[in-house]
Image (spheres, helix red, strand yellow):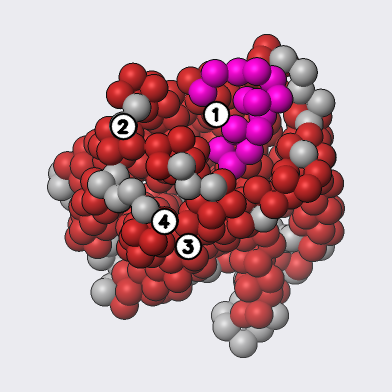
Amino acid sequence: MQTTVPTLAEAPGSVAAPFRWVILFFSWAALLTGTICRLSFGTLALSVGQSLALPIAALGVFVTAFYVGYVLSNAIGGIITDRVGGRTTMSISLFALAIATFCFGFTSSLRVGLILQVIMGLTAGADYAAGIKLVSSWFDRRERGRAVGLLMTSGSIAVIATSALLPTMVAGYGWRYTYHGLGICVVAVALLCALVVREGPRGGKSALSSHQPARPRMSALFTRNFVLLALAGCCGFWGTLGLMSWAISLMVKGHGIPSVQAGFVLSIVGAAGLLSNPAIGWLSDRLGGRRKALTVVSLGAFFLMLLAFGQLSSLNAFMIGAPLLGVSAFIFAPLLVTQITEQSGPEMAGSAAGIANAFWQSGSALAPVAVGAAFQQSNSFAAAFCTLAIGPLLGLICMLFVKEDAHR
């Protein structure tokens, strides 16, 4: 029993060399399915609103309800991941999310829907920390940027899937059966993760690998850099998740774009992010792990692209602008994630990733309500995108004060 983990932990050329890619794949699959569930309401919002006779501003409250639970589950799930391991946390989280997602298809009122969205959020957050923990413990620093970049492509694939497939599914089967189908898919992924995934060789379970008390170790995470990175991510994801939640509805309501075509535009956004995430991770590795300057440039580009996209009005213009918006909307994420995990070390990677993502997703929780209110008050597509652009601009300012050498 004592030789199992060390055997997997040997240098490249051993079984660990190929198996770490298996771990990366299943971590990616878990994060993909969780993100699809997280983004699904933004795609199906208008259908849900029409079915339940809800005003458009109330639809943003549904998204916020989800992120209230999601923020809590990230913080708690990250700490639990470091105690029990990434495999256990990931499997249980996905099983619970599957049940909650399936049940949301039975929603009959605003109150029931809000409760179920909170429950979905509470079950959806721990898979992120578990995935980051597993990748951090299976990949060393020389490959970690690329590995995290590949892991984060799950978000782009999720955008493509929700934007390109869900509008067609809801048109054919209705939003209720769409949620039932999502729940069944998540169950399948949860079962596969439970059967295949193994804990990593580097800091798999901090409670078992260290005799230091948990409280001082946890307090050691909250350095100046950690706080700045957490704030920068919060502001950046204000733009990204706000965009994912509202882009289709804004194109439909603001410029009369059919929902299926608006979904195709958003799928182009996701496709562009799919290529940019591993590319920026690889580039930061090639630069010796220096990621601050790349993060500043990425957030600046996102700010400018949101402002520019808000000035567009036709389907052709949206399709031209979508690739540039997609690159800028996702490219900063793997840089921030990698900086957070490198600061904490593999043994505390779950806690660091979970707590940081809780801060980051608080931006996601606030953005849908702010954007919905801005659009309802002004009836202006441009005003909604200006509201989104505030986030990455503030994130850029936070990144200027990060001292990169402090955690190298």
Q: Earlier in the sequence, mark 2 or mark 1?
A: 1
Percent position of residue 66, x then y? 59, 28
Percent position of residue 368, x then y? 44, 29
From the image, tell me which residue sits under label 1. Answer: 63
Q: CA distance from mark 4 to mark 2?
A: 17 Å
Q: Is residue 44 magenta?
A: yes
Mark 4 or 3: the one toward you: 4
Residue 7 shows in the view: yes
Q: Is residue 254 magenta?
A: no
- In what element is the residue under mark 4? helix
- In what element is the residue under mark 2? loop
Kindly report the secondary structure that dominates the magenta region of the rendered protein: helix
Q: Earlier in the sequence, mark 4 or mark 2?
A: 4
State whether residue 195 is above or below residue 279.
above
From the image, tell me which residue sits under label 2. Answer: 380
Q: Earlier in the sequence, mark 4 or mark 3?
A: 3
Percent position of residue 387, x then y? 29, 33
| The quarter of the displayed image where residue 203 is located | bottom right
- In what element is the residue under mark 3? helix
- The magenta-colored residue range is 42-56
Left or right: where does residue 255 sit relative to residue 287? right
> CB atoms at circles 4 and 1 under 8 Å apart?
no
